Image (tube, grey):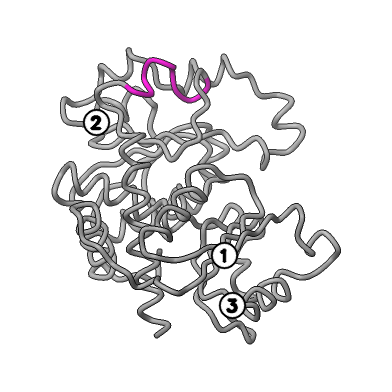
Amino acid sequence: MSQLSNQEVQDYLNAALEFKNGRQSTIGQGKFAVNMFFENSTRTKSSFQVAEMKLGMQQIVFDAEKSSTKKGESLYDTCRTLESVGADLAVIRHSQDEYYNELLNRNFGIPIINAGDGAGQHPSQSLLDLMTIFEHFGHLDGLKVGIIGDLSHSRVAHSDAEILTQLGSEVYFGGLDSWYTFEFQAMGPHKTVDDLCKEMDVVMLLRVQHERLSAEENQGFSKADYFEKYGLDMRRVNLMKSDAMLMHPAPVNRGVEIADDVVECDKSYIFKQMINGTFVRMAMIESVLKGAN
C-alpha cells in the first residue's frame, strides 16, 4: 500500500464503485487465474474467485495441501510451473512476510496480487476498507480512525494505518500495550477503548491472531478478561458518534473482541465490507491485467 500514490488509491476506489454500480468488463475472457492460498481463508479467497469469474476468467484449481510444495518444491518453482501451464494471474497468500520478493526478483512473468503475506500487508483488504469508509463519508482526509486489537500480528493494521495516514486521516490505536509497537507509535497515540469509541469516526476491531502468538502468550490469554478490557459490547457502541462506523476485517471471534449482538448492529459495516471486497478485487485484477497486456 505504501507504494501507491493517493491518486492511484482513488483510481482503485473509483473503479470498484463503477463495478458496484453495474459496469461490466470482459478483460479476463480467455485468461486463467490461480489462487494460491497457503493459509486458511474464506472471505479473501472466495471474493477473488467471484471477482475473477465476473471478469470472465477461468480458474486453475490449486490446493496447497496437495501441491508439490509438500514434497519440498519451492514457491518459485511452483509458481513457474503454473505460469508454464497457462496461468495469466497468480493471487497468493503465504505465511512468509514479503514472500513476493523471491518471485519479483527472478524470472516470474505473470502478475501477482498479494492476498496477504504473514504479518506484513493485506492490500486488497485495505482497499475495501477504504472503499467502505469513502462510501459512507465521501472523503478520507480528516477522519479519526481507531484500530483496536492485535496490532503487531495484523497485516490489516499495518496496511490500513499506513495508507490512512498517507491519505490524511488521523489514526489512533487501542488494545494491549505490548502490541502497540514502535511502528504504530510513530503513526498515532494509544487510547482506551472507551475513549476511542467516544472520539472516533471509524472504530476498527482486529481479531486476536492466536496462530501467530507464542505458546506462552496463548497459555496466559483469557477470552473473558480480553473482552472486558478491549472488546466491543453495546455499552461501548452507544458511546460512539451517531454517524460513526464499526468495522472488522473478519473472521470475527464473537465474545472475544466483539459481542454477538454488535456484529450486525446498526453501526456495523462488517458485511458491507465483504460486499465491497468483490468489487475492489475486480478493480485490482483489471488493473494488473491491463498492465500485463
Please give the residue where the numbered disc 1 appears in the rendered image: 34
Residue in front for this viewpoint, 123 or 291: 291
Mark 3 vs mark 1: give the one in front: 3
Q: Which mark is residue 199?
A: 2
Kind of residue at badge 2: Glu
- Residue at 40%, 21% (x, y): give it: 232
| Label 3–label 1 contact, CB within 8 A | no
Q: Which quadrant holds residue 66? A: bottom right
Give me the C-alpha separation between circle 2 and circle 3: 51 Å
Q: Earlier in the sequence, mark 1 or mark 2?
A: 1
Residue in front for this viewpoint, 38 or 174: 38
Q: Secondary structure at mark 2?
A: helix
The residue carrying pointer 1 sits among few (fewer than 14), some (14 to 19) or many (20 or more) residues within 10 Å by Cα, namely: many
Residue 2 magenta: no
Residue in front for this viewpoint, 147 or 58: 58
Q: Which residues are magenta?
A: 256-264
Please give the residue where the numbered disc 3 appears in the rendered image: 86
Q: Secondary structure at mark 3?
A: loop
Give me the C-alpha separation between circle 1 and circle 2: 43 Å
Q: Earlier in the sequence, mark 3 or mark 1?
A: 1
Kind of residue at badge 3: Gly
- Residue at 35%, 70% (x, y): give it: 286
- Residue at 62%, 45% (x, y): give it: 40
Q: Is residue 215 left or right of residue 186?
A: right
Q: Quadrant of the N terminus?
A: bottom left
Kind of residue at badge 1: Val
